[in-house]
Amino acid sequence: YQGLAGRSTYEVLQLYAAHGQQVKFQRSSVVTQLHGAIKKRLKQDLKSLHSLALELSKDFQRQSKTCLYQVLAAVQGIQLQNEAMQMFQIKAFDLEQSLQEVTERYEKEKQKRKALHNSLIELRGNIRVHCRIRPLLPFDDAAGHSQDRQRNFSEKVAYAADDETVLVKCSRPGHASVNKTFQFERVYNDLESQDAVFSDVAPLLTSLLDGYNVCIMAYGQTGSGKTYTMLGPQLEGNLAFAIEEESELGIIPRATQEVFRLISEKPPGSYWVEVSVVEVYNNEIFDLLAKDSCGKVFGVKRDVVTTREGKSDVPLLTHETVENASEFLHLVNKGLQLRVTHPTLVHAHSSRSHLVVTLTITTVVFGDNFGTLWEDEQSSQRLNKEASFTFPQKMRDNKSTSSSRASSPVQLEATEKMKQVKTRLQLVDLAGSECVGMSGVTGAALRETSFINRSLSALADVLGAIAEQRAHIPYRNSKLTHLLQDSVGGDAKLLVMLCISPGQKYLTESMQSLGFGTRARQVQRGQAKKKNFPVLSKGK
Ligand code: ADP
Ligand code: MG
């Protein structure tokens, strides 16, 4: 058994070995198969990879070629643009140079224009008189003088014979009627519009921005159309005027619009406008824009003084800065509601005070432009008199917001070189010029009338003194003339708008007004005779 077991074990071992060999053999044949399959697969993959790589490289080549073309095109474009840019630079340089030349030429032309405009205005007379005859109106029918009821009061006796002549038919009971004529620079008939009246006023506003003071005043009896001409039609039962009726607006609103239009053509920020509205009543000046602590407007009495430079000034007078015409109109309308009036027999809304609306235009002039901007001697003298440079509140506020940026020494120096020059436009709606008897007033109203008459004769005296070129002009004889001093005498431009009621009923008053206008015109004639008009120097 041992032997048998040993043999069996041996056999088992052999069998094991054989089994192992068989397993080995089997395995190696699977591996070979697998190997073969893998190899085959790898070969396939490699082939496809190769073709893919080939494809990719071809694609890459194609793409890089197109990119290259694009880059080339871009480079060419840039070169072209560079050339164009250089051309533009040269052109810009040329343009800059010609702009400078044109600017210089423009400055010269501007001076010439100013001088010519001023000579034109002076040729027409620094004081000129226009006359406007209003249409006959329903209230002209009301009876006038009690002794003279038979006469036809509404009969028209004053006409515009032509553009420069007023014809008045003067008739007295029992006498043949006599025609009298009066000549003025311009006469408007009853059909002429507010627009036509203003078109003759507008050139004066050019003078205003050229540095001359201007005054436009309406003279005439109550009801003759002064307020209509200066402001426009009055609102029903209200002293304010109708702002909405554009075509009916009078000289004051139109002049303001024109001033702002002219300013809009100038460099921004170089001009600003302040407004004051005063009333001269019983030889007292009332500030119609003064406000109480609650901000309510009420008239405060002010006084007019003469400054050391010999100019008239109203200390503490309210000046409001306005930035456009509508701001101005609302402000003036507010002031107007305070006007003192007294209903006389002539007209329910007769105003018994002089209304003076003043626009003060302040111009900023830079030091460097000083010589070129104001070539004429008078203007530069005017400029040199101005000392300190003060911005109004609104401008100061604007300045402070931009000051963080404006701190370079160059800018500071520029600020120091700035000067300001002020010119004034005074627009006056005078109180009615009628005689006491005609208006039938007594008591307080009589006092008013005598103050009005005194101030109007003071105005006539001032114009007379200017005409005779007297050394002393009696501006201070009344608050009215004192207030208007700077825009009546000297090289200031004054336009008197005579307002005439055409009816027979107002004949005496109309003749008085025409007489005043004729005397005022003598001023112009007197000046024209004595004054050598400035001939433009060769340089201009
Ligand atoms: P004044 O201010 O001289 O007292 P107003 O301007 O108040 O006179 O005019 C008196 C009246 O005549 C007003 O009703 C006004 O509307 C009217 N009026 C004046 N001028 C004209 C005119 N040119 N066309 C039409 N109405 C006018
Ligand atoms: Mg009036």
Image (cartoon, helix red, strand yellow):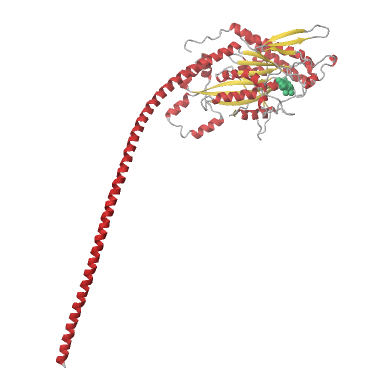
**Relative horizontal placement of residue 390, taking residue 502 as reference (left or right):** left
In this view, 302 is above or below 126: below
Question: Which quadrant of the figure has residue 3?
Answer: bottom left
User: Which one is in front, 105 or 346?
Assistant: 105
Q: Return the x and y of residue 307 as percentages of the image width and height.
A: 59, 19
**Relative horizontal placement of residue 364, taking residue 9 as reference (left or right):** right
In this view, 61 is above or below 113: below
Quadrant of the drawing holding the N terminus:
bottom left
Tell me if residue 8 can be seen: yes
Q: Return the x and y of residue 315 as percentages of the image width and height.
A: 62, 24
Query: What residue do we see at 59% from left, 26% from top?
Result: 274
Quick check: which quadrant has ligand 1?
top right
In this view, 126 is above or below 335: above
Question: Which quadrant of the figure has residue 74?
Answer: top left
User: Which one is in front, 279 or 536?
Assistant: 536
Query: What residue do we see at 18% from left, 80% from top?
Result: 18
Tell me if residue 351 can be seen: no
**Relative horizontal placement of residue 118, taking residue 369 as reference (left or right):** right
Question: Which quadrant of the figure has residue 499?
Answer: top right
